[in-house]
Image (tube, grey):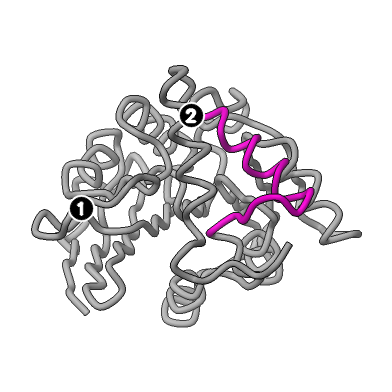
Amino acid sequence: MSPTPEDDRDRDAQQFAAAGLVTDDPTGWFERLYAAANKGEAVVPWDGGDPNRFLVEWVERERPSAVGRRALVVGCGFGDDSEYVAGLGFDTEAFDIAPSAIAEARRRHPGSAVRYRVADLLRPPPEWRGAFGLVVEIYTLQALPDPPRRGAAVQLAGLVAPGGTLLLIAFRRDPAAPEAPPPPWPLDRDDLDALTGAGLRPVRVEELVDADRWRVEYRRDRPDEGARRPDADQDSTD
């Protein structure tokens, strides 16, 4: 198939998502999109072939320690972010609800140290609860309408281990901007607060205005930290 203009990269996802909403199936469209993309019949708009630049910027600034830590990449797609996280030294697992995405990730990264598997954020494996020192969520919550997005946020928060970090990157909802056909369903402050209500503490909230993104770092405090930690939550606008 011929290259798709940048302005049209969302078109296939929007069409598959719209069909899923008509049939009250808000997550099944991911598999249909990835299966079509694997056959050269559709474009996955978030497949850039490189790790997400907002993830890379965060890592270069924060230098997270990977020593003895497990990481989970949520909605991993074709695996670019997962391979990057594993390259930092994390013991990395990655999942997607779409079997076709996982099959392609394994094909693209033969011999990878990442453990790729099919799983559903709305019903994650019980053994994942509180198991990961780093959870990376990029463009997954925003690909869900609400419901089930708030329920997915609660499940997402539950994956973070005590002392662990969740990094969330998503499009930012601008109430002044004209509505565009979803997906994505950009996130607002209430969406960010849903993760706080599920037991995480926002460490740094970055409103990347020029890029229309949120980049938010959350932490799950250890049981003995809450009473003695300083109020270090930060908001910034870049």
Q: Residue furthest left?
A: 176
Q: Give, as a three-letter code, the residue at label 1.
A: Arg
| Residue occupying the point 55% across, 46% down | 74
| Residue occupying the point 22% across, 68% down | 207
Residue of label 2: 19
210 to the left or right of 27: left
Q: Position of residue 42 (x, y in %)?
A: 65, 51
142 to the left or right of 173: right
Disc 2, SS: helix
Disc 1, SS: loop
224 to the left or right of 71: left
The answer to which of 151 and 23 lies nearer the viewer is 23
The answer to which of 153 and 68 lies nearer the viewer is 153
The answer to which of 58 and 16 lies nearer the viewer is 16
Q: Position of residue 182 (x, y in %)?
A: 35, 45
Residue 202 part of the magenta segment: no
Q: Give, as a three-letter code, the residue at label 2.
A: Ala
**Label drawn at residue 183:** none
Marks 2 and 1 sit apart, C-alpha to C-alpha, by 50 Å
| Residue occupying the point 70% across, 70% down | 87
**Label drawn at residue 228:** 1
Magenta part of the chain: 27-45
Q: Callout 2: few (<14), some (14-19), or many (20+) C-alpha neighbours within 10 Å?
A: some
Which quadrant is the N terminus positioned in? bottom right
| Residue occupying the point 17% across, 56% down | 178
Q: Position of residue 199 (x, y in %)?
A: 29, 37
